[in-house]
Amino acid sequence: MASVELHNVRKAYGTLDVIHDLTLSICDREFIALVGPSGCGKSTLLRMIAGLEEITSGDVLIDGKTVNGLTPRERNIAMVFQSYALYPHMTVAQNIGFNLKMSGESTAMIDKRVTEAARMLDLTNLLDRKPSQLSGGQRQRVAMGRAVVRNPAVFLFDEPLSNLDAKLRVQMRSEIKSLHQKVQTTSVYVTHDQIEAMTLADRIVVLNHGRIEQQGAPIELYRNPTNLFVAGFIGSPSMNILEGVVEGAEGTPSVRLSNGTAISVGAGKHIKRGQAVKVGLRPEHLSLAGSGSILRGQTLLVEPTGAQTHVLFDMAANQVTALVNGDIAVRVGSPFAVTIDSDLVHVFDSESGRAL
């Protein structure tokens, strides 16, 4: 087990910079998730830690030692990819123990470690099977077993669940979290799925165009996004963003939306009268029965998901999504109204996108 540090790391392809002078510290035993849209540099960053991608400038340290010039094997890391990369002609046991065999470990040691990894990942009854006889989730567990068996200092996960269906992704999330709790190995997990990041990570690092937008505990990023990008990326469904102008900045602060609706905002906002702002409203914070500012419109779309229903309504050319109880009957074309507590309203500067 080890810490991972990135000091002013930069990656460029010719004149194109994809990672910009990035600094990040990952503590021993910590589970970090790197999230962001496609092309933000998260997989490139992971490959630089692994030694699969050359660093243009800066330093990568593992357990306090600079590893820029070391091969992936010399860095004592284990990587789990989205493709399982299993050998089809080998059994599960042979796949898990392959790297140990190539390292010259004794048969007894290989058998012991394979048995331990199989027990940990519930693969004991599958050790004699070939990959073609396994489900997608079982294959991914074998790929994880191949990493676990090496007792690495750092686990690196590159979107390992993207090839699985929704039900299996939920199951494998639980298994990855359980694995981390058992082995307590420093882990860096890349995903574009912020739900995966929220449920798995001790800390989330949000990347955009090769730079860190914000980092912190999942609930901190959800409750206190520092800018519009993070606000729109963290949370599902995405936060509603509406344009408005500050009306009252003292006493009871409020923002007048473009359709004339006034929304009260919590005290402590750094706003001033006449300031152009963007208001952020999370769909799950819009209530049918609560108190606060009222938003009215006409229902455009109703999407029942069982316990909850997504309602898209039009509020004078502003489309707003609300997440309501699935037992509530809502019809397309009917009037729709919700309330929002002032303390749950986010306010951002229109120009900079900064949280106010």
Image (cartoon, helix red, strand yellow):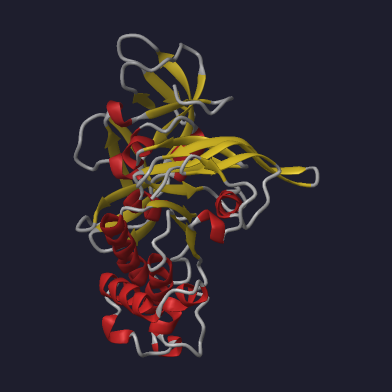
Name the residue rendered at 34%, 16% in the picture: 268
Q: Quadrant of the C terminus?
A: top left
**Residue at image location 36% in from the left, 48% down from the top:** 201
Q: Is residue 252 visible?
A: yes
- Of the pair 267 and 143, the residue shown nearer to us: 143
Return the x and y of residue 82 as percentages of the image width and height. Answer: 50, 67
Between 233 and 328, the one nearer to me in the picture: 233
Residue 315 appears in the picture as rendered: no
The furthest residue to the top: 250
- The spot of residue 13 in percent (x, y) is 76, 49
Q: Is residue 313 left or right of residue 21?
A: left
| Residue 2 vertical position relative to residue 141 in the rendered view, above or below | above
Q: Residue at x 38, y 65 (%)?
A: 148
Residue 125 drawn above or below residue 347: below
* Drawn side of residue 313 relative to residue 56, left or right: left
Camera-side residue: 5 or 290? 5
Taking the spot 61% from the left edge, 42% from the top edge, the residue there is 210
- In the rendered structure, the answer to whether residue 190 lies left or right of residue 294 reads right
Residue 59 position in % (x across, y down): 61, 39
Q: How many marks?
A: 0
Percent of width and height locating residue 288: 23, 43
Q: Nearer the viewer, residue 338 or 86?
A: 86
